[in-house]
Structures are given as structure tokens and as C-alpha cells.
Amino acid sequence: MSHAAILVVEDDSDLRDALCATLNIAGYSADGARDALSALEHLDRHPYSLVLSDVQMRAMDGHELLKNIKTKHPDLPVLLMTAYGTVQKAVQAMREGAVDYLVKPIEAEALISLVQQIVTEQSAASADFIAADPRSREV
């Protein structure tokens, strides 16, 4: 079981609740935010391992949220999701720093598998390795 904290940003409350429940059942600590502005407030108050955000939202869309997150939290992985995916938008999102771009509807198993992969990679990248042998330290 992972204790990684995930922020789910989705303006559809039913879908947000379902995504949070799915992630909670899988052993993650999932918080929901109704829009990008409340997501930024969450990020100022709590550390997260991953942000899962819808693209189509009012006031600030997922791409703008991604840019804001990458400015303040450059190492925080952001996974975007949309019902209106195109290859062009996915490529744009990846260039802006998204770790992946999912098209709704999203299967629970596929979501959990991808989240596990991202969180594991994030943990490995931030792990401190200890080496006693001088040659190992050089590596």
C-alpha cells in the first residue's frame, strides 16, 4: 500500500468523488479540488506526490494549471485527463511538462496502474542512496 497523496482536480463533483474513491481504495490518499484555483490553494497547504487534473475547466483550464504548477513545483508530476483529447493537445501537454495525457472515460485499473508507475518513479528519483564503498559513492 502506498501512502502517496494525490490531488484530483475535476469540476464534475461526481467524477471527482469517483476518482478519489478509486484512488483511496487503491491505498492512496486522494484529495479533491473543484477547480484550478482551489487546486493551487491545496498545493500551497499540503505536499502531494501527483496531481491528476481535468483539462476542460472554467476560469483556468488544465493547461494553465499545469504551467502554474510547473512554476511553483517543478518536480511535481501532473497527469492531465480530458474527454476531448487530440494528439496535438497531448503533445502540447507533454511539452509543457505533463507526465501523461488520458482520455475519458478512464478505466479504474488503467488509472491505478499509471498512478502507481508515476508515484514509484517519483519516489525512486527522490530517494537518497547511501554508499559505504568510496567507488560506489563516486557512481
Image: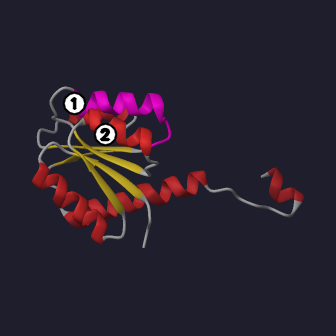
State the scheme by which the image is colored: secondary structure
Badge 1 crowding class, 10 Å Cα cut-off, few under 14, some 14 to 19, many 20 or more, is some
Q: Which residues are magenta?
A: 60-76
Identify which residue is drawn at 45% across, 43% down. Answer: 76
Identify which residue is drawn at 89% across, 57% down. Answer: 134
Q: Which residue is mark 2?
A: 39
Determine contact: label 1, label 2, CB under 8 Å.
no
Corner quadrant of residue 83: top left
Q: Position of residue 9 (x, y in %)?
A: 25, 44
Which three-letter amino acid code belongs to the residue tagged 1? Asp
Q: Secondary structure at mark 1?
A: loop
Q: Position of residue 67 (x, y in %)?
A: 37, 28
Can residue 96 be seen in the rendering of this structure? no
**Residue 51 vertical position relative to residue 55 in the rendered view, above or below:** below
**Residue 112 vertical position relative to residue 12 in the rendered view, above or below:** below
Q: Position of residue 21 (x, y in %)?
A: 23, 64
Q: Which residue is mark 1?
A: 61
Q: Quadrant of the N terminus?
A: bottom left
Q: Earlier in the sequence, mark 1 or mark 2?
A: 2
